[in-house]
Structures are given as C-alpha cells and as structure tokens.
Amino acid sequence: MNNSRDRMAILIATWFGCGLSPFAPGTAGSLAALAIAILLHEFAAFTWWHFLILAAVAFVPATWAADVTAKVKKLKDPQIVVVDEVLGQWIALAGLRRFNWVGYLAAFALFRLFDIWKPPPVRQLESLPGGLGINMDDVMAGTYAALVLFAAGCFNLY
C-alpha cells in the first residue's frame, strides 16, 4: 500500500475498518450495514427501494475498492474485504415489507445463511474476475435473502 488511492480503496473495502475485525469480519461488515440501515430507516424514512438504490449506487465504488484491495494484498478475495457484505445486506433489506426487529433479524440471518451456504449461482459468481467476483456472490446472496423476505412478508410472517 503505497499511495492514497490504495489507502482509500482499502478504507472502503474494509468498510471503514470493519473488515479488520479479528473475529468474523464478514459478519462485522453485515452488522455495520444493518446498523446503518436501521438508522436510515428510523431517522431518514428509508424504505425497501431506498436500500436497493443505495446498494446499486455503492456497487461501482465497492467493486473498484475490492479489486484494488485484492491486488494490493495479492489475494483473490481477501478476508478483510467486507464491502461486499454491506451490498448484500442492503439488498436483503430491500426484501422487507415491514421494518421491525423481526424483519431486521431475519434479513441479517438470511443474508448470512445464503452468503455462507452459497447455493448456485452464488458460488459460481465468485469466479468472475477481480472486484466483480468478490461482490457479485454477495449481491446474489442478498437477492436470495430479499426474495425469501418478500415472500414471507406477503404472508405476514414478520
């Protein structure tokens, strides 16, 4: 890491240090995304579509940051990169029909489940090059979580 561009990329990729957590950095990134989302919902009236837009807008800088960080660290998918979990968590939250503690907990648990389990095509998306592969598997895991949450919300399950 020898320049300000690399430092900025690592700052974003680690989601401002969450990825440096010695225990479960991906979970730390998801929890940070969830905390931000709760604040945005409670104080800025964000709804499901706001979180979808937020994830879409963050996708390009997240992909750039993950790509630069992977090159700096000389790893395909460094464990410290957690901005992908942030994207996936926000996408999962876009599936909520009602924002309450049960919904938040379900969004967190389902996203982490799909991110760890990696059902097809989640695992296959990891093979995309660079930052795209780092981020796309979490985008798909978040999409699966959002679909489950949306269906559950249609049946008033939370």
Image (tube, rainbow, N blue to C red):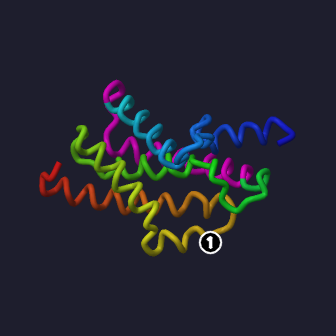
Residue 42 or residue 117, whichever sits in front = 117
Q: Is residue 114 magenta?
A: no
Task: Write the residue at 61% across / 59% down.
Answer: 134
Task: Write the residue at 40% across / 39% down.
Answer: 34
Residue 80 or residue 148, whichever sits in front = 80
10 Å crowding of disc 1: few (<14), some (14-19), many (20+): some
Q: Secondary structure at mark 1?
A: loop
The part of the chain drawn in magenta is: 42-69
Task: Write the residue at 72% across / 37% down.
Answer: 8
Tell me: residue 143, above or below residue 97.
below
Tell me which corner region of the image, top left, top right, bottom left or bottom right, holds residue 20.
top right
Q: Is residue 62 magenta?
A: yes
Q: Decide if residue 143 is on the left or right side of residue 1.
A: left
Q: Decide if residue 123 is on the left or right side of residue 101.
A: right
Task: Write the residue at 31% across / 39% down.
Answer: 47
Q: Which residue is mark 1?
A: 127
Q: Which residue occupies the extreme top position in the image?
A: 43
- Residue 19 x %, y %: 60, 43
**Residue type at tag 1:** Ser
Tell me: residue 101, above or below residue 125.
above
Q: Which residue occupies the extreme right position in the image?
A: 2
- Residue 61 x %, y %: 63, 46
The tally of labels here is 1
Residue 40 or residue 141, whichever sits in front = 141
